[in-house]
Image: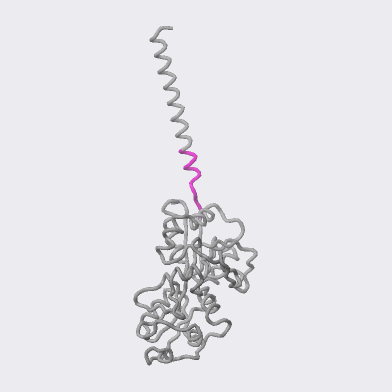
Amino acid sequence: MNKGSKLAMGIAAISLLLVGCGKATSSTGSKESSAALSGKVTAVGSTALQPLAAKAGTNFTAKNTKVNLTVQGGGSGTGLSQVQAGAVSIGDSDIFAEEKDGIKADKLTDHKVAVVGMAPVVNKDSGVKNLKMAQLKQIFTGKITNWKEVGGKDEKIVIINRAQGSGTRATFENAVLKGADAVKSQEQDSNGAVQKIVSTTPGAISYLAFSYFTNKLQAVSIDNVTPTDNNVETNKWKIWSYEHMYTKGTPDKATTAFLKYMDSKTVQDSLVKDMGYISIHDMKVTKDAKGVVTQN
């Protein structure tokens, strides 16, 4: 075989190899396209978790454009009942399913996605920045009715409570009232509504998730312990809860992918903290459904 023949055969072999590679690339691209994540995910419930879930959902769907993801509030009770009924993909809750009457916790799967600290907040003109836990209980049970009784302004205390079924209310009352009945008062369905009313109502007091604190409100320390992430992480600050995303049965691929995303470093190490929540991976303690706290 002469040199010209050998050269021609070599070029032909290289051409076949390149064509083969081109076909493989085309096939792989087609496979990836057909495997693109798609589906509908609906998360309903806790208004304390809603801002984080909504922002994470927006980021998630930006990369998974064929997924239709909706996040709504309504309260933890609504989230738990809706997911139990199979009406939604995810039930967002500030409380364990075991804590809610009528919910069969053993039929649901708990996905803890963050921790939220909660604290009493007052209208700035009250003149109060710190309360004893006993005083806070007396305020919400109607025993103390004027701010001057706890070192503040001579002004009537206006209590703004959360509605029954609110996980934030359940968390607050478990930590502060310890089984005592709250005095009858105005009730609001969401953190956002409480934030607005307390900031504009002289003498008002309520409680909010840390993520809803603004400079228009006064967050109140308890027994000289400030409501901070670090104090929650060690349980020095007692009013906190997990943010749960509950599912029923085996989640579909889109829901499973979103839950995995919620536990990713992208969310836990940046988004969670940027939005005023606490990463579940930063907690130095663990709390169970009965409220028992143990060191990790």
Q: Which residue lies at the image location 51% right of the left edge and 71% below the top edge?
A: 235
- Image quadrant containing the C terminus: bottom right
138 vs 35: above or below: below
Residue ranking furthest to the top: 2
142, above or below 77, in the image:
below
Nearest the eye: 91 or 109: 109
Quick check: is 145 in the magenta stretch?
no
- Please say if 155 is above or below 65: below
| Quadrant containing the N terminus in the rendered view | top left
For the record, the magenta segment spans 29-39
119 displayed left or right of 289: left
In x, y percent, where is residue 129?
Answer: 39, 82
Q: What percent of the width, then of the height, locates residue 203?
A: 39, 86
- Residue at 47%, 56% in the rendered image: 68
Q: By what rule are the colours in the image chosen?
A: one colour
Residue 226: image location, x then y, percent: 43, 75
Q: Nearer the viewer, residue 273 or 96?
A: 273
| In-image side of 116 versus 97 (left or right) | left
Q: Is residue 47 visible?
A: no
How many marks are shown on the rendered structure?
Answer: 0
Residue 29 appears in the figure: yes
Q: Nearer the viewer, residue 109 or 176?
A: 176
Q: Which residue: 51% across, 58% down?
A: 41
Residue 110: image quadrant is bottom right
Viewer-closest of 198 and 228: 228
Q: Determine whether 199 is above or below 87 in the image.
A: below
Q: Residue at x 42, y 21 (%)?
A: 14
The image shows residue 262 at horizontal and vertical percentages of 49, 58
Going by the image, does 62 lie left or right of 258? left
